[in-house]
Structures are given as structure tokens and as C-alpha cells.
Image (cartoon, helix red, strand yellow):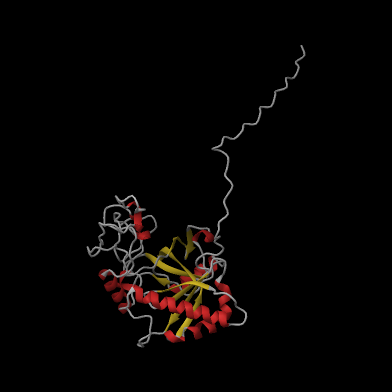
Amino acid sequence: MVLTPVRLKPKPLREESPRQKTKPSTPKLIPTKYTQAEREVTCFFANNNTADTISQPEQTYSERQSLADTALRRLNAAFVDYKDISTNPFIHARITMRGAIVFTTGNDQSNVVCKDYISIIKHALVYYGDCERVEIGKRFSQFLLHSVPTHVSIPNNSLSISTNYPQLVLGQMPHWLTPPERRENKVCCTIVMTLTGNVKKDAIGHQNLIVCNRQCQLEVYIPYGRSTQCCKCQANGHPAALCQNDSCCTVCAGPHITRDHPCTLPICKQGPTCIHPPIRCANCNSPHKASDPNCPERIKLGTLNKATNATNQGDAPMAGASN
């Protein structure tokens, strides 16, 4: 008996349903060519007591922004007056609570070109005081290393990091996160590791690093101070990334996240942009949003932070841990 092979007919290709068809991507009118860090130029000024200084803690948000507008005009004018520049390089300027001016270039312009014009920047801003330093982008990236043995000195910890991971270029000597009195009787603590350049955690490629024969958990360092306001619970003193409190609305102080803020008016887009009553600050109980820069509690904390030069106010928790 001879078996004849049976040819199977190929199944017709199944057509994609309209839902399965991928829509062509719409090109963006304003493409994001560079990240925010690649577009920022920060100018740091010496502390002085002149009337025109930008680092006075009693200045309101409107006063600081007015100074920032003037600085933006003056700096752009200085660049345009230069023979090889025809357009305004900067589109935004802001003044930090510590008195630095942060300029932002356009969406299609990197801040790298500004490295050749630092003298022009300093001269244009001499009206505001002595510009001590101009920082182009983010020079350093900081990370936390948990479970570092306390009996090992900081130089030896630094040597261990450099030896085990030569790809990581330390921008400065590591330092302990907490003061000596808080490290007493502890076998392991946390150090702050500073790397040169704008380094992301994903680019390192490891969740743990071996330091002095210990497996140390790697975590992004989030600095904060007394005046840092949490956008989740609206309280001061910690960022949202470290918040373990319940959500609180910045518009009405209700027990919900701000983007879920309701409004009965049909013309309102709701959420954080709502300007209709009831509006209440979660920190001072006044009829303004908790994000209002003129909130008395926020001004008080900003002044205190300026006077004490406060930085990080406590231990950063272990990643994934809860207190």
C-alpha cells in the first residue's frame, strides 16, 4: 500500500482588524531634542548686601520672577550683540531660593555651546553681583550606597569603589549621609557617592555594588531640606519620592491626590488648575493653594532654610523599606 502525500492548503493570512492596525505616529511640532539638564545654565552669585542682590530671602515669588525676566533680557541682548550669534539662545530664566539664576536654552539648542561664552554671561549679569560660577548642565550625579561597613574609612571605601568599578568616575570623595553621633554602635550605614556627569541609575546597570566585600544597595540620592514641599501630602520637609503619608489635595486640602480634585463648574478642567472655591491650604488653612509661593508657612521655612543653610534633614530610607 502506497501512501500519497497530502498537500495542505496554506491558510489565508488573517487580516488585521481596524483596532489592531497601528496608527502612524504623528510628528511633534516641537520635538524634544535635548533633555532639561542638557539645556540649563546655572549662575551662582557671591553673597552680598547690596540692594540689587537676588538672594534676599524676604523677596516674594513675583519679585524674584521680575528679576529673572530682566536677567533673561540682559543675557539674550549680550549674546545677540556678539558678532557670531543672531538669535536669542535662552527662552526661560528662574531664580532659586538660594539666589542662583537658571537659564534654559531653546528646545533645539544644547547648553554645550555656552561653554565658550562664560565670560559674556558673567559680564552681562555683573549688575546682580559677583557671578562666582557658571554651571553648564548637570556636572555631577549622586547616589546612595546602603549597608556600607562603618569600621572602614571613607578613603578606603572610595578606593574600593574605584577599584571594583573603574567605569564609575567619582566626582568627589564619598561622605557619610548622617553625622558621627548617629552612626555610633552601627555596623553599617549609608554613604553618598558622587559621579561625574549626568549619570542615570539605569545606565549603571546594577542594583547593588560590592564595596569593601559588602553588597551595598544602590539608590538615587534625593536631597531635600526644611523648605522642600511634598506634592503628595503637601507637607514640608520631604519629597514625594520618600513620602509615606496619605494623599492630600493642593487645591482644597481634601483626602485625594491633586489631579483628582473635583469641581462642579462645567467650564473648569478640574485638577491642579482649578481656581474655584473651595480653596484651602493644607499647611496654614488659608484660602489659597498649598503650592502658593506666598504662603506664610512656605516663606517662613524658606527663610529658615536660607539662614541655616540646611540640606538633607534625615536618613534616607532603604529602597522599598517603610518606617
In the picture, the quarter occupied by the C terminus is bottom left
Q: Residue at x 26, y 69 (%)?
A: 297
Camera-nearest residue between 141 and 188? 141
Q: In the drawing, does residue 86 fall left or right of residue 311?
A: right
Query: Relative to residue 309, is residue 201 drawn left or right?
Result: right
In the image, 290 versus 233, the foreground residue is 290
Please provide percent x and percent y for residue 143.
Answer: 45, 65
Residue 172 at x, y = what percent?
A: 48, 75
Reply above or below: 287 against 320. below
Residue 21: x, y in percent?
Answer: 58, 40
Foreground of the two, 42 or 105: 105
Location of residue 287 by image quarter: bottom left
Give the residue at x 56% y 79%: 80
Looking at the image, is 2 positioned above or below residue 72?
A: above
- Image-quadrant location for residue 50: bottom left
Image quadrant in which the N terminus is located: top right
In depth, the one of 165 and 274 nearer the eye is 274
